[in-house]
Image (tube, rainbow, N blue to C red):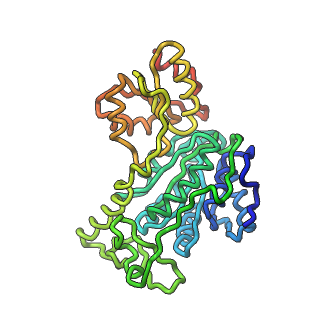
Amino acid sequence: MRYPFPVGRSDFIQGDEAIARAAILAGCRFYAGYPITPASEIFEAMALYMPLVDGVSIQMEDEIASIAAIIGASWAGAKAMTATSGPGFSLMQENLGYAVMTETPIVVVDVQRGGPSTGQPTLPAQGDIMQSIWGTHGDHMLIVLSPSTVQEAFDFTIRAFNLAEKYRTPVVLLTDAEIAHMRERVYIPKPEEIETVYRKLPANEEEAKLPFGDPHGDGVPPMPIFGKGYRTYVTGLTHDEYGHPKTVDAEIHERLIKRIFRKILDHKDEIISREEFMLDDAEVAIVTTGIVSRSAVRAVKILRERGIKAGLLKLNTIWPFDFEYIEELAERVRKIYVPEMNLGQLYHLVKEGANGKAEVELIAKIGGEVHTPMEIVERVVG
C-alpha cells in the first residue's frame, strides 16, 4: 500500500499530525469527530488521509455522535478512533462506559486544555486525568496512556490501538495542547517495522454465540463482526455470556464486571509503562507525566548539580496505575514531589500508592503555562 505521507524516514511535524499518521499505520480506517481546539488538526489530517487509504472520515453533529459512530464502526470490523478536548471528552463519557460494557475496542484521543467549561481553548493543561480514569459512571476499567513528546504521541497511538484490540477495551490517549501543537522530528517507520495487533475473532459458530464469554481463559472473548453471518446481541445492560440482558441478577453482574476488570488487571505488567531517570540512588523523587516530564528531567539535572540526589519517574501509563511500584519507591526515598498542570489529580494517586512510606508534595500550576525546571527546583530546595 502507498501511504499519503513518507515512511521509513524522519519528518518535522506537530503532535496532532503524528497521532493521525500513527493511527493510519496502526490500521485505523474509520474516524469520526467534531472540530475542537486543540484537537482539530487530528481531524483535518484524518480527513485528508483517510480517502487515500480506502478509509472513512466523517464529521458528526457533536462529540456524543462521534464516539457512538466509532463504536458502531468497530463492531463492523474497523479499527476506529475519535479525538477531542475537555468539553467534548465530557460529552463522550456515557458512550465511553457503553464501550467498556460492550467490550468494544476504540481509541479516544483527549488533547487537554484549560478548564472547566470552555476555559482556555488554546492553552495546555492536565486537568482531565481524573476524568480519563473515572469520568463515566459505575464500576469500569479501561487503559489511559500519556505521551510527553511528539515521537511518543506517534508511538503511543500505535500502542493504544494494539492494546484496544488485544484487550477489547477503550484506550484513552491523554495528551495536551502543548504536545499537540509542538513540532519535533519524528521517525515514521515503514509498516513492516510496526507491530500491529488485531482483535481475536471467533474460530467457529459456537464461539460466535458466546460473544461475551471467555472460551480462552484470558478474560478477553473473541469478537464477532456484524455482517459476517453471526447472530450477535450487543447491549450496555448487564448481560450473560450470550449477550442476553440479565439486569436483576447480582451473580451475573458481578461475574461480568469482575471479568472486565480482570482482563486488564491480570495483564497490567504488560500494559503499564514507565521510565526512570537517576532513581537508583535518589533520596528525592519527582513523579510526573506528559509535558511536565520534560521540565522535570532538566530539574533533576540541576538538583544533582547542587548536590541533591533527585530522580524522576515518568508515567507513560496513567491507568491502570502501578500502586505497588509507587509504594516501593516511597520506601527508598524521603520525599516525592508531583508537578502537574492542575490543582492535584495525579498527586492523589501517587499519595495513595506511597501509603504513608514517604511524604508526597504537590507542585500545582494552572493557567496554561508549563512548569519551568527552576519552578520545580525551587520547591525541592525549599
Residue 249: x percent and y percent? 25, 72
Image quarter of residue 358: top left
The single residue placed furthest to the front in the displayed view is 192
Q: Position of residue 317 (x, y in %)?
A: 47, 46
Q: Is residue 186 left or right of residue 371?
A: right
Question: Could you tell me which residue is drawn at 58 percent across and 55 percent down?
Answer: 158
Q: Is residue 309 visible?
A: yes
Q: Position of residue 98 (x, y in %)?
A: 44, 66
Q: Residue at the spot x=73%, y=46% of the render?
A: 10
For the question of whether residue 363 can be seen, the reply is no
177 up-or-down from 171: above or below: above
Which residue is depicted at the point 54% across and 15% down?
A: 305
Q: Nearer the viewer, residue 156 or 238?
A: 156
Q: Quadrant of the N terminus?
A: bottom right
Relative to residue 348, is residue 131 depicted above or below?
A: below
Q: Quadrant of residue 243?
A: bottom left
Q: Quadrant of residue 296?
A: top right
From the top left corner, tell me how far across and down residue 36 is, in percent: 65, 53
Q: How many marks?
A: 0
Q: Image point 54% across, 54% down: which residue? A: 159
Relative side of 75 to 235, left or right? right
- Seen in the picture, residue 167 relative to 376 is either above or below; the reply is below
